Image (cartoon, rainbow, N blue to C red):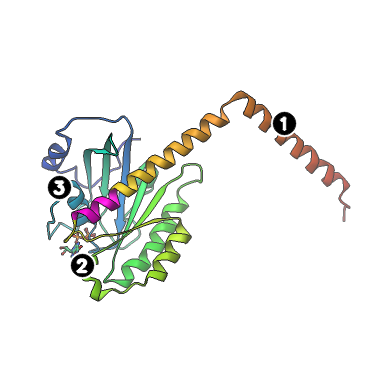
Amino acid sequence: MPLPSSSKDPKPAMEEKHSKHGFHSGKDINIVVAGMKGVGKSALTVRYLTRRFIGDYDSEMEAVYTHNTVLDGKSLTVHILDTAWQGDGTEIKEDQILWADAIVLVYSITDRTSFEKLREIADFVLSKRSDETKLVMTLVSNKCDLIHMQKVSEVEVTQFCAEYNCLFFEASASESSASVLNAFNGTCRQVRLTNRKREKLLRFMSNPAVAAKLQIRNSLKSLTEMKWRSRAPTM
Ligand SMILES: Nc1nc2c(ncn2[C@@H]2O[C@H](COP(=O)(O)OP(=O)(O)OP(=O)(O)O)[C@@H](O)[C@H]2O)c(=O)[nH]1
């Protein structure tokens, strides 16, 4: 699927810097980073790409970055869409949701509203995806260096993850490259796992013997249903 529209093309310097190794896996992973204004979406993205923390970004700017890397011994190309918070529900567009293999939902531990808003975003995202196209969602609590200002409890986070089937990562874009790498790498691993499972299922389903069995089972099921319907008393 083509890259989603973005209000700005990827920064050329960034693109060049992260494409310089030139390896291509054939299996790209598309990630959308979403969350309220000021939670650190750009800081996390840039930390993952450059291992550096840059304090200030143009908050109006939505950007797509391409990053070539190696994960668990296999080359990987990651495309990251860093969304810009608009506050009017238009920060993620439908084609961007369909493009994504994973959505990284970011909140700041110092801002309760930023956590609460993620429900709206997650509901919107899930309303645009069918079950078959398994989408990976991860929850990232950013600004963990400000733990003394924490406004969201562990119980709430656990509930959220159970409800939306999310993986959870704690990060600090300002203090720790490792935490940010862990969040993005964990997300990519989960996408690979999901893809492998889906491919395995597709292979299984396309086996002629399995297809024949399924067809027989479905025919028997509809025969039984017809039988019950014809026996049911009419009012
Ligand atoms: N203490 C602390 N500050 C952070 C961290 N990550 C980001 N910030 C700061 O939070 C502010 C917002 O960061 P951004 O990366 O611009 O946030 P954003 O989510 O991209 O915001 P929008 O682009 O406006 O949607 C900046 O002042 C950052 O320096 C962090 O881990 N710890």
Instruction: Answer with mark 1 or mark 3, whichever residue precedes in sequence.
Output: 3
Circle 2 Cα neighbour tier, 10 Å, few/some/many (<14 / 14–19 / ≥20) = some
Q: Is residue 181 magenta?
A: yes
Instruction: Answer with mark 3 or mark 2, whichever residue precedes in sequence.
Output: 3
Which residue bears the numbered disc 1? 216
Displayed quadrant of residue 115: bottom left
Residue 147 point in image, percent of width and height: 25, 71
Which residue bears the numbered disc 3? 50
Displayed quadrant of residue 176: bottom left
Does label 2 point to a residue whose CB lies under 8 Å from ligand 1? yes
Marks 3,2: beta carbons within 8 A? no
Query: What amino acid is at disc 1?
Result: Ile
Query: What amino acid is at disc 2?
Result: Asp
Q: Secondary structure at mark 3?
A: helix
Residue 213 point in image, percent of width and height: 68, 30
Q: Is residue 104 magenta?
A: no
Quadrant of the image containing the N terminus: top left
Q: Going 47% across and 53% down the picture, which residue do you hit?
A: 127
Instruction: Answer with mark 1 or mark 2, whichever residue precedes in sequence.
Output: 2
Mark carried by residue 145: 2
